[in-house]
Image (spheres, grey):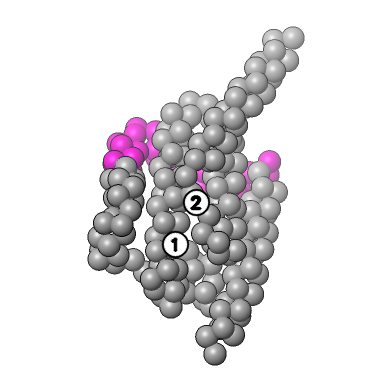
Amino acid sequence: MLKKVLQSLAVILVVLLLQAGVTLAEEGTPKTGDPAWDTLSQVKKDWMLKLYDIVVVDRPELKPVADDSLEWRLKEMEYDTKKFQYMSDKHPDMIVRDKGLHAFANLDWFPEFSEELSRKDPAFAELEKKIKILKEELSKSKNLKALEEFINNLSKNEEHKEKFKQFTTELARVQKILSSNAVEVTRKNQ
């Protein structure tokens, strides 16, 4: 009987935390209009929320550090999207579309880009500061190492292997979008 009550409470807790996570995820990360970037952003966001849910259910004592980590990562995604939009507008030739997702997602970003974007969009400068503060606070968390170890070991857990397989499948879907988008951009430039 006690076990059923605890399971019911756990389900209620997960629903409440999912709602909180969804609220956090709905904030920020504007759309760019680039199908590959926007899809990748959504896949990453969904994956972060899924990992967050797993942490909260399996290791509830890590919830505070998971909350901080999720907030930092979502702000980073918003920041990266603003950078991507800037580069799409000002330096589209610097966006690497033909060397895979890693090259596509890791933008060559220079301090002068930040300066120019901060002048045009003061919210960008504030976002940079916020991310730095969140990262510093997170690095001081006594449970950060435990969170990282837990997440790193999840893929070895039979219970979660299917989730990792799904995530990999979603990344492959984004790669297809990126590849077809790269072909389209190449045709336009010829």
Q: Are marks 2 and 1 in contact (CB under 8 Å)?
A: yes
Q: Residue at x 53, y 67 (%)?
A: 101
Q: Residue at x 65, y 21 (%)?
A: 12
Kindly tell me whether residue 153 is visible in this rendering: no
Q: Residue at x 40, y 52 (%)?
A: 79
- Is 106 included in the stretch rendered in magenta? no
Q: Main structural element of the magenta stretch: helix, strand or loop?
A: helix
Q: Residue at x 44, y 50 (%)?
A: 78
Would residue 174 be found to the left or right of residue 147 on screen?
Answer: right
Residue behind mark 2: 30
The type of residue carrying mark 2 is Pro
Toward the bottom, the furthest residue is 190
Kindly tell me whether residue 188 is visible in this rendering: yes
Nearer to the camera, 136 or 176: 176
Please provide percent x and percent y for residue 54: 59, 36
Q: Residues within 10 Å of mark 1 (few under 14, many from 20)?
A: some
The type of residue carrying mark 1 is Gln
Mark 1, secondary structure of its residue: helix
Please provide percent x and percent y for residue 58: 58, 31
- Is 146 included in the stretch rendered in magenta? yes
Nearer to the camera, 159 or 7: 7
Nearer to the camera, 76 or 148: 76
Where 19 sits versus 139, above or below? above
Nearer to the camera, 159 or 27: 27
Find the magenta span and give its range: 133-159
Please provide percent x and percent y for residue 123: 33, 47
- The quarter of the image holding the C terminus is bottom right
Residue behind mark 1: 85
Q: Which mark is residue 99?
A: none
Q: Residues within 10 Å of mark 2 (few under 14, many from 20)?
A: some
Please provide percent x and percent y for residue 52: 54, 37
